[in-house]
Image: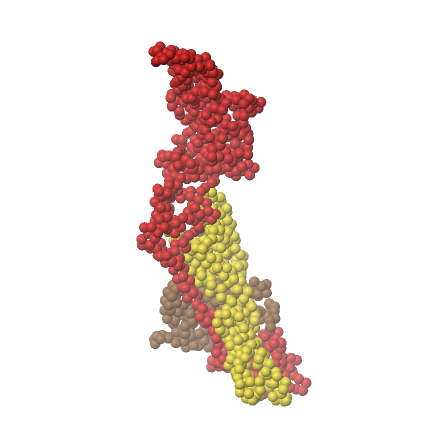
Amino acid sequence: MRVAPKIFHQTILAYRGFHYAWWALGLGLVSWLIYLIPNYEQPANGGTWQGYTLGTVGALLIVWLLWLGIRKRRNDGGIGTVQGWVSAHVYLGTTLLWVATLHTGFQFGWNLHTLAYGLMATVIISGMLGVWAYLVLPARMVRQRDNRTRDELLLAIVEVDRQCLRLAQDVHPDVGAFVQSALDRTVLGGSLLQQLSGRDRSSVEIRGGKENSTAQRIVRNRNQGQVIRALAERLARSPGGKEAVLLQELLWLFARRKTLLQQVLADVRLQGWLQLWLLVHVPLSLALLVALVLHIFSVFYYW
Amino acid sequence: MEADPGGGAVMAFLMEQGLGESTDVLVIHEDLCVGCDNCEVACAETHGGVSRLDRAGGASFASVHVPIACRHCEFPHCMKECPPDAIHRAPSGEVYIDNTCIGCENCVRNCPYGVIKMAYPAPKKPSLFSWLFFGAGSGPGQHHDCSHSDDKTALKKAVKCDACKDLAQGPACVRACPTGAAVRLEPQRFADLISRQKGGL
Amino acid sequence: MRCLIRTIAAQKDTLEYRDAEYVVNEISLGAASDCTLYLEGRGVLPRHALIALRRDGRVQIRADGGATLQINNKEQRSALLALNDTIRIGQHLLTVIQAPFGFDLALSLKTEGVVQEEGRLEFELGPMSLTEAGWSRRRWAWLGVLLVLIGGLILPLTWSLWPGDAKARPAHWPVTDNAWLSGPLHSVHRIPGLIDDCGACHEAPFVQVRDQACKTCHETPDHVAHPEKAPAFADQTCAGCHREHNEPATLVRHDEALCVDCHGDIAQHWPEKTELRDVGNFAEHPPFKLSLLHMQGSEWHTTRIAQDDPALSEVSNLKFSHAQHLNPDGIDGPDGSTVMECVDCHQPQQNGKLMQPIQMEQHCASCHSLAFEATDPERQVPHGKPEAVVRALEEYYARLYAIQGGPVESVHELSRPAQRPGKPPKSFYAAMKAWADERALEAATTLMEESACHSCHDVTVHAEKSGAERWRVLPVRITEQWLPKSRFDHAAHLQIDCGECHAAVKSEKTTDVLLPDLANCQQCHGGEDSSSQVSSGCVGCHGYHPAAASGYHALFPRSTVQKLPSHNSALQRAVSQQKGSP
């Protein structure tokens, strides 16, 4: 049996006592010192000897950072643990922003070179957002789900819905149809923006204002508000007795339903934020790789 | 709706999960786990494409999650009534099923924790790069239905976690977790687990 | 209350019963370890429900906090229990069974797996993750890669390799090789032919800009006349020092290191050049070396001599005392006593840099008259060689004699005596010539040896010679450019009084070299990094590329030399293309 490490359950930032943070600081300091060495021939730019040095360091860093995508999928062999790689990736990726900025000599323009720099900066900043997301969101997600899985929440909704339908039919067919439409028109999930907003886009079909009217219209049933309001009104008008009891049960069930739906919506929203940064980080880092190669190519094409 | 139970409650939870009789159990910290399933991917990739770990399943309590995976019990329940005597304990302590399994499912029934499943061998996968660049074939550890197979001569066998006894660097699930949420512990280390939970990250 | 709990553990084919007896006031159910009945798993709160015996003997179950109970498949918060009632808490199913004798309540407890039944929602789930909503990292990665390839390589490269010359390229192209610019061109290079054609300077791919590209327009002498003889310059290229495409745009290096890297230690870089002295910055500059004009034989030569060399003296062959001329009490002139100033003789050139050369006719003649005849003071001899002086004198006196008809004492007494008709006798012309020659020689001797000529020129008397050959006057050349290897600009120093740098007031001898020495300049000028003095690098006075000596190019000694437009075929082509002519 392999013994578990002495320290475990550390965040990627605190991994091994912020081991890689020191590496990153050291590299940043050395880069700055290289930059500060005076060069009389020309103003600071990527073509001085300092520029070439920092550029080489930056390019090697970029290739190594991209290699994480391969390493994390290499389960047989590979050096260290994936968490170690991720910790190093985060710290050295942050230092890359510093090293690359020194490499530019702060000369920017509308050209391929600044495009590569811009792609790199966007990748790094999206990565920082990812670190924040990974540190903060998982705990939030678990707590707001009462420690249940999303599937369990959905099953609970199934159960609640079944009871709602039965009770509603017992009250009156109209109420049954009303509740049925509320259930049919419940909306969970959607496009990227809809998922991230976490808003309830459910609706319900209302038959006119009076019971005899056949006019139909669809109104918003956000957070089951429309249904709850309608049921409460009907309860207020109710003569009492069995119908009142049933209506009260129905109200309580819909309140429960609202909570469950909100939990699922919040779970989808938080999971969306947990993964959104990757949609920027991964594609742009590959575009950056190509831009980096072309940057080096064009620099030596028109040497 | 969340109490802070205190260390004793967490220990009681672990004991109720049957971890008292375990020797090597995978424990996941829910505040670190981002649900990337890299642990399952790693398990599948190092074991012929069939994952022996169910990350999402299993019980949770106070940010401690015990996924459904073999705990390598001190007195393994699965070893009883195995007709070909296919289940052994390695000298280093891991309980594993060798390839003489005949698929009788006795061990599946006997295990009180449901960590053993029956699976057909997984089909061969294309190279990593062709999946990465072109999405060709199923990716690393991507779930495929191992409850049936196109190969008529294939046999459904019992599979379970073997703590990666054949891998030089140790359990793949722990090494593959990018956030450090997964750790394999023996009962002597549970006190560390609880103090880490209480002390926060 | 006495309660029996029967736990049923169900495996695939077997059932296992375990009975437990509880004698408590209340049965607490939940996930906390101090509950009477511990129920683990998802959906179970630490304190989920309480079962209590009411006074009327009925058993009631109550949900605690925000817990939910499913009692008989209905979500309820509390209920009175009867036989066969089912209570679902999380994955656990409690059923009220027949209580044995002596017990108030009996429950059976069955714990199920996570998914107990297939449930179907009444509504369709939309996409519940980013991947389900169609967002694929792989697809966006390919899109990004393709965009960068097209915009960063395909389009600019096609433009760059377009067949034909720069004119053949299409007028509108989405991305030209301007995308590969690493910085703007210096504004002086933003001319047609350069700004629209990278290949004008970058002639071959993957090769640094070669000297011949620069020399298409710039005709510049190198730092040394024969670079092949100086190992230090063997590898130098234009691009080694002149870098384009920078911000701030800096084509020309002004720093000291450009020079001091070699001139700081000549022995290391060019040991054969023993005459060059090491230079640090201006504070550590060796004494200036002057170019001294002097006569050797009958020709003028320039010698380089250090200013601190005791042998240094001006050998212009002129006699002049600055002290005398700058006498603060005045010097006698034609208008009486005149106080002279430097500017009376020394005027700056049009460009303000150096002083105009001293010309006798312009600067000296107003006081130094070349008159020779007291009675005819307006008449002067030409300022020329002795032969010309004597000839002029002879002609003057001969004319007088011719007018007078005989010797003349005074010009004023000229009168024409009565003439006998007919030609004068032969003896008249001989007598005229003899008298004229005699008088001329007299006047010339006075001029040459006593007055006008003598006072400024070095006249050697050869008494044995006759006529004009008696006197030899050494030609005068005043050095105009003492420091040809540097650029001094008087215009920048006009605020300073002449005497602050040039010790003219005290100078009595012509041989004094009145050029200020290094120490004088160092009163104000310090090294490049000086913060207490005028910051003076090397390039401020010296140029890296030496200026050409004469002609058109000498008008612009400071700049690198541009070819005249007629010589500049590239520029001419670009200009003619702009005009539309073939």
Q: Nearer the viewer, residue C575 or A137?
A: C575
Q: Position of residue A51 (x, y in %)?
A: 45, 49
Residue C219 seen in the figure = yes
Question: Which chain comes out yellow in the rendered image?
Answer: A
Q: Nearer the viewer, residue B146 or C151?
A: C151
Q: Write the residue at 38% across / 66% down.
A: B134
Q: Position of residue A32 (x, y in %)?
A: 50, 49
Question: Which chain comes out brown in the rendered image?
Answer: B
Q: Is residue C477 above or below residue A154?
A: above
Q: Write the residue at 50% across / 29% down.
A: C346
Q: Nearer the viewer, residue B134 or C387?
A: C387
Q: Write the residue at 51% across / 28% down.
A: C344
Question: Which chain comes out red in the rendered image?
Answer: C
Image-quadrant location for residue B192: bottom right
Residue B16 seen in the figure = no
- Asked if residue B136 lies left or right of residue A33, the reply is left
Image-quadrant location for residue C270: top left
